[in-house]
Image: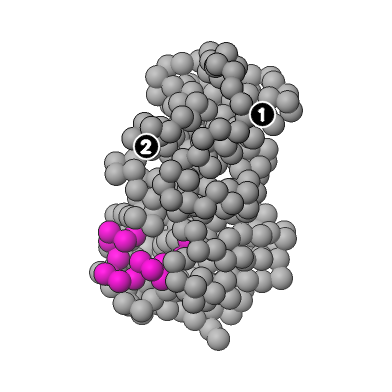
Amino acid sequence: MSERVAVAGAGSWGTTLANLLAKKGHVVSLWSFEDEVVEDINDSRVNSVYLPDVRLDDRLTATASLPEAVEGADVVLSVSPSQHVRQVMRRAAQVMRKDALVVSASKGIETSTLETMADVLEDVLPVGTHRSTCFLSGPSFATEVAREHPTAVTVAARDGEAAQRSQDLFQTDYFRVYTSHDVIGVELGGALKNVMALAAGMVSGLGFGHNTRAAMITRGLAEMSRLGVALGANPLTFMGLAGMGDLILTCTGDLSRNRSVGFALGQGKQLSEVLGSMRMVAEGVETSRAAHALAQREDIEMPIVAEVHAVLFEDRSPEEAVRNLMLREPKAELWQ
């Protein structure tokens, strides 16, 4: 059955998901705050700024009007950068159907409140809709999905029927969707892996090899799980697609923006210089602020997060950060 879908956010991931749904026969309206992106998509069938070299389906249309995209839609997909989700979805909620299925595909933690996207959406969406809101995450570079490379992701919701509906909506022969009830675990996995990707990029930029990166990934996963459990997540979620799967992808893949930022920092570049050269958002930078604050609030030991935060915001060198991690007091691998 064809549904009317609104996608809020026309970056690479929003455009990819919008195109996936349009190719399935849904009528998709993609909102962008950038007029040039809207014109590019509607006139040339391509988003040359954020998803070049991928022709977009004719059933996908772009608009610069968020109310025009959202009003009357059966499904509303939130794909804005995490620090803008509150503002965008508060506006969308003013015209959104009360029974619309909301799917969040943004990965991050709001720095001003330390809230996940689930908390943010619960704040701004109509009362009673949060149980059926879904959260899509997992190892999925936009460009590869857009080129129909086989990909597997997870969609989490407190309401099983909503998760099933979202699964059916996105499932294709190249995009496999699993379901989960662990909203907090799926959200934290998708957010925190970006911080670990910054760390993995730094050690590669410093010239260290596979041993160092493997240690960073494995101990990063331990930190992610530790914080997740403290906040109510199922630890097994971090062994799955939204945890280990996404962590491996972003820490090793050349298409990872966060790994690329870390790599440049490891080579001695300044954060302002690196971010100034990018048009797309590296979510891990702001998420590292939130993760560090959450660890302090919950009294959870997250040494990699602490060192990444120090490199980004406290003028610590990547070399010193690695040295600090290696010279920590020895302890058992598994501990509470």
Q: Residue at x 34, y 43 (%)?
A: 114
Left or right: 249 with respect to 109? right
What's the distance in space between the residues labelled 2 and 1, CA to CA?
24 Å
Which of the image's four quarters has the N terminus?
bottom right
**Residue 129: x, y in percent?**
34, 71
**Residue 213: x, y in percent?**
67, 29
Q: Is residue 154 visible?
A: yes
Q: Residue at x 47, y 66 (%)?
A: 157
**Residue 314: x, y in percent?**
40, 19
**Residue 286: x, y in percent?**
41, 37
Kindly identify the amino acid type of the residue bearing the numbered disc 2. Glu
Provide the residue designation for mark 2: 298
Q: Is residue 58 visible?
A: no
Kindly identify the amino acid type of the residue bearing the numbered disc 1. Ala
Q: Residues within 10 Å of mark 1 (few under 14, many from 20)?
A: few
Q: Secondary structure at mark 1?
A: helix
**Numbered circles on residues, count:** 2
Question: N-terminal of the two: label 2 or label 1?
Answer: 1
Which picture quadrant has residue 56? bottom right
- Foreground: 217 or 102? 217
- Foreground: 150 or 72? 150
Q: Residues within 10 Å of mark 2 (few under 14, many from 20)?
A: few
The magenta span reads 121-135
Q: Are marks 2 and 1 in contact (CB under 8 Å)?
A: no
Q: Residue at x 39, y 50 (%)?
A: 116
Q: Residue furthest bottom?
A: 1
Provide the residue designation for mark 1: 215
Q: Is residue 155 magenta?
A: no
Q: Is residue 125 magenta?
A: yes
Q: Is residue 78 above or below residue 228?
A: below
